[in-house]
Amino acid sequence: MLDSSVDEKHELILLSESPYDTPNPNKALQDPEGLSAVGGDLSSTRLIHLYSKGFFPWFSEPDPILWWHPEQRCILRPEQFHTSTSLRKALKKNPWMFTVNQEFESVIGHCSALRADKEGTWISSDITNAYIELHKLGYAHSIEIWLDGKLAGGFYGVAMGKLFFGESMFSLQPNASKIALKTFCTLAKDCHIELIDCQVESDHLLSLGAELIPRKEFSTKLEQLITSTQKNLSLLSMGEKTHKQRI
């Protein structure tokens, strides 16, 4: 249940019908941290606009759509990805392959199903359909990891300019999601990606080299890396390569 007893500095707004309605991130609630707005829809126009301003949707049905902009943002600089000894061994042990944007619907489907089996998922059918549409428009992308010809893991997110907003990852084989993220960090320079937004911290992400930065610093990065809501053409062109590539 949302707490309405907040001081004047912090507020939770109801989004209007305009897809360009933009909350003030500096007025986001402190409890729960970063909750900025409720309502609106998951149209591509609204999602692209709010992502470019640093907001992301995160909610579970039957709750209304909730929009977040945390005070402390979890980010990963691709060059700082940490490859542990165990991950190095896993990479050498098996002939891992990767593709980009070849199995987007399968990736988001696995992300949803695995979370539903564990703790319940926020990746509802509405979320799934919204991101599939973003994928068709060239904004949402997936990295797929293959082992012995079968999909083993991967992740998906939204790319604009030089920033990638990570959404969710999955593993069907040990280490597969880590390998997916490492692969993407290796590709990042060629794709002109300078920063990966991990949104909310976890021990898992921090162990891979992610860090927390203040909202103000993250907002500055947004302005520097996203000059307009342009697609990342490098990721689009990489996805045109249909053959699997060895890691």
Image: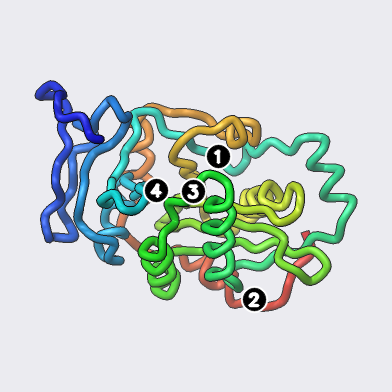
- Front position among marks 1 and 4: 1
The residue under label 4 is which amino acid type? Leu
Callout 2 secondary element:
loop
Residue sitting at x 53%, y 70% = 105
Check disc 3 and report the residue beneath it.
Answer: 120
Whichever of callouts 3 and 2 sits on the residue coming sooner in the sequence is 3
Whichever of callouts 4 and 2 sits on the residue coming sooner in the sequence is 4
Residue 27, image x, y percentages: 19, 31
Residue 215, image x, y percentages: 34, 31
> 77 or 17, which lies in front?
17
115 vs 73, left or right, is right
Mark seen at residue 110: none
Check disc 1 and report the residue beneath it.
Answer: 77
Callout 1 secondary element:
loop
Task: Give the CA separation, mark 4 to mark 3.
Answer: 34 Å
Task: Give the CA separation, mark 3 to mark 1.
Answer: 29 Å
The residue under label 2 is which amino acid type? Lys
Q: Is residue 216 visible?
A: no
Whichever of callouts 2 and 1 sits on the residue coming sooner in the sequence is 1
Residue 138, image x, y percentages: 43, 70
Q: Is residue 200 visible?
A: yes
> 88 or 119, which lies in front?
119
Given contact means CB atoms under 8 Å apart, are the residues at marks 4 and 2 in contact? no
- Front position among marks 4 and 2: 2
Check disc 1: other Cα within 10 Å, few if <14, some if 14-19, many if 20+.
some
Check disc 4 and report the residue beneath it.
Answer: 225
